[in-house]
Amino acid sequence: MTWLASQGRWLPGDALRLVVAASVPLAGAVAGGPSAAAMLLTLGGAMALRFARVPTVTDLVGQAVLLASAWFAVTGAYEVVPWLDVAAHVGSGAVLALLMRDVLLQLRLVPSEPGRRGAVARVLHVTSAVVVLGLLWELGEWAGHALLTETIRVGYEDTLTDLLADGAGALAAAVVAERVAAPRRAVR
């Protein structure tokens, strides 16, 4: 069965993807266009998890983390609970690391060989990819602040903290993923 043909099946995570899709216009109604745009990016992440065909648990937890992070922004929770922004970036970085690991392996852009050398290479590639995605997110936040509305919170400290949290979450998830995958490779 080809990858595209396998996409036609209904997956357990698709119900949550419908919630994410419904959240796009709802976020726009609650907090305006920039919030709808952020929720649309969340939908992109939810769909990427589907297309990568990550394990069901990773899919569901990943979508929940991304959706919660987006709704925290829409509802202003980050302003009420200051540490929540860092926690959301750590969680999102971890989700993106699991996604990027699967995608990079499927596309054969990282070494798949077992052992320490392959594992270290995968961890570095995955963590770097997530940090680049985090940088793109931060540039988008800055552009939204500069061009659309000053209600989008940006600043030197916020940006650096977010990037460090993205990297920390990605590194932790990439290391754990390698630890979990190592016994499976040894059995083969």
Image (cartoon, helix red, strand yellow):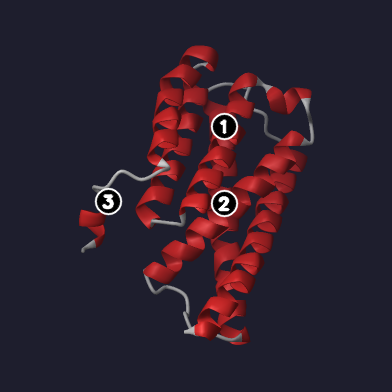
Amino acid carrying label 2: it is Val
Q: CA distance from mark 3 to mark 1?
A: 26 Å
Whether residue 156 is visible, yes or no, is yes
**Foreground: disc 3 or disc 1:** 3
Q: Residue 149 location, x and y as percent?
A: 57, 21
Disc 2 marks which residue?
95
Check disc 1 and report its element: helix, strand or loop.
helix
| Label 3, residues with CA under 10 Å away: few <14, some 14-19, many ≥20 | few
Give the residue drawn at x 44%, y 42%: 46
Numbered disc in front, either 2 or 3: 3
Q: Are marks 2 and 3 in contact (CB under 8 Å)?
A: no
Q: Is residue 90 left or right of residue 24?
A: right
In the rendered image, which residue does mark 1 sit on? 70
| Location of residue 104 in the rendering, given as x and y in whole percent from the top left corner | 44, 67
Spatial distance from mark 2 to mark 3, Cα to Cα?
21 Å
Rendered image: mark on residue 7: 3
